[in-house]
Image (spheres, rainbow, N blue to C red):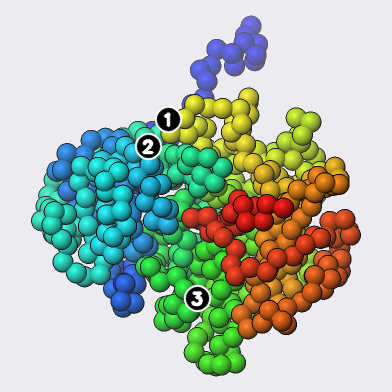
Amino acid sequence: MTTPSSSSAAQPPICSTMMQMPLSLNHLLERAGTLFASNEIVSRLPDKSLVRHSYGAFYQRTRQLAQALQNLGLQKGERVATLCWNHHAHLECYFGIPAAGGVMHTLNLRLSPEEIAWIANDAQDKVLIIDDVLLPLYQQFAHLYHFEKVIVFPFSGAAVPAPFTDYEQLLASTDTQGFQYAPHAEDDAVSMCYTSGTTGRPKGVVYSHRSTILHTLVGCLGDFWGLKGSDVILPVTPMFHANSWGIPYGAVMMGVKLVFPGPHLHPEDLLDLMTAEPPTLSLGVPTIWMGLIQAFEAAQTTQPGRWKLPAGMRSLVGGAAVPEALIRAFDRHGIWILQGWGMTETSPLCTVSYPKSELKDAPMDERYRRAAMAGVPVPLTELRIRGEDGLDAPWDGQHVGEIQVRGPFITGSYHQVPVSEDKFSADGWLRTGDVASVDALGFVRITDRTKDLIKSGGEWISSVDLENALMAHLDVAEAAVIAIPDPKWSERPLACIVLKPGRAQGQAPRPEDFAAHLLQHGFAKWQVPDRYEFIDAVPRTSTGKFYKLKLRERFPA
């Protein structure tokens, strides 16, 4: 007699009946052209006028770009660099370059000419697509790196000078009859970005069809981007910063109206654009939003009614710690800031501080406190806090350690750089260099970068916590805290203060006023800076983060 166990053992294993289709950006492009042909894409030109396209035009133009690149001899895996602001043609590059089989490499126009040339050489870029308004920047590094082809987008409307190729003429002369997408596997590369390189040479991170699609799907979930077809997105985050945090891919997948700001990122320009084309979702670094809310609130007195902030707009802010004071300021106008944390290496969305259901009845002070944290890990990512003892720190909100992450859209290596223990753990987790704690609800609270922590008398002081508290002071626009050598305590914190506009130096608060303010915010006396310096502006990296190395050079002791 046959027993059940022997019968089941004889059965073949159950396998999936699902089709085997590679994940592909080309699917998003085809979806947009088929389903959302009439939806709008708006771009602000250098003269501040607006040009309107549709997803139907985007679909056609993107395929023309792909065909043109193939006609120029682009081979699979070759890099095509972009040096562009945020606009519709840059979006075409996001999809047209990989559709041709190439890898889009966004160059950061805020870097020095020498740095741009070094990165282009490291990536071995073959073709450059550049805005005409950025040709003066190109001329500064053209002698340092040679592209086989330079294609110029006439962003300003001026004639493209010889010997460059006119982007619009190239597309207009390209027939897509019989166009074929380049064959690919889902792990093939589609784009690459370089890290900011504040502690060494920038390193290339290469994204695949698979990693990009998975990151897009996660981002579109309700607690993160929460994209709906009725949304209007204002991506202030540059498209050369970690692919504008991935939002262009999500917008195309959902057919969402996009409003690109072009090169106009001053607070007044953004407020004009928000008033003319009200967004429901915006993205940017804290610096942008600080300037924007200050300009808006000042105009309430001097020019009432000039601008309208879009009530109910969601705003994803990241790239640096978001002060609680900034979150409160926008909430007064009906706008809720979602803080996100990530890196070029994480595609970049890794955590978002959304209001979890457990907090629905929490007091507003608690909700603000949570909103100022880095947030909760997004799906498909794993996160751990590794202490100095080499063990995982408990999620109790008290123990701190280095954030280490892994997942299908988190890099496992850098372009042409050997894997090293200072960047990846022995068991394959990305070492981020950020120090944090995690509480029982999964909220990550970044306390500092490992290189920016201040060790005073054997105790750690968080520069980020001090900065956030100082920026809650009514007279402070920005604050950056660095460590300076101390003969007794090894290191002590120094606070660099930028006063709000209109505050004359003679009216500035005294150091003891700042100390009292920090003590009221719960800092111990030994944590409070002994020294304060007034500066005109905090130096920033090309990605908008505080460049503390420059401050340490300016204030060595």
Task: Say which amino acid is labelled 2.
Answer: Asp
Residue 416 marker: 1
User: Is label 3 in a helix, a strand or a loop?
Assistant: helix
* Quarter of image, res 5: top right
Mark earlier in primary sequence (2, 3): 2
Whether 5 is drawn above or below 234: the answer is above
Check whether the beta carbons of the residues at disc 1 and disc 2 lie within 8 A of each other: yes
Left or right: residue 438 compared with residue 123? right
Mark earlier in primary sequence (1, 3): 3
Task: Say which amino acid is labelled 1.
Answer: Gln
Left or right: residue 365 compared with residue 294? right
Q: Quadrant of the N terminus?
A: top right
Q: How many residues crowd around disc 2 within 10 Å: few (fewer than 14), some, or many (20 or more)?
A: some
User: Is label 1 in a helix, a strand or a loop?
Assistant: loop
Residue 122 marker: 2
Q: Residue furthest right?
A: 525
Is residue 350 visible to the viewer in this orientation of the structure? yes
> Could you tell me how far apart the alpha carbons at marks 1 and 3 are, in whole angstroms?
39 Å
Name the residue: 35% across, 45% down: 117
Q: How many marks?
A: 3
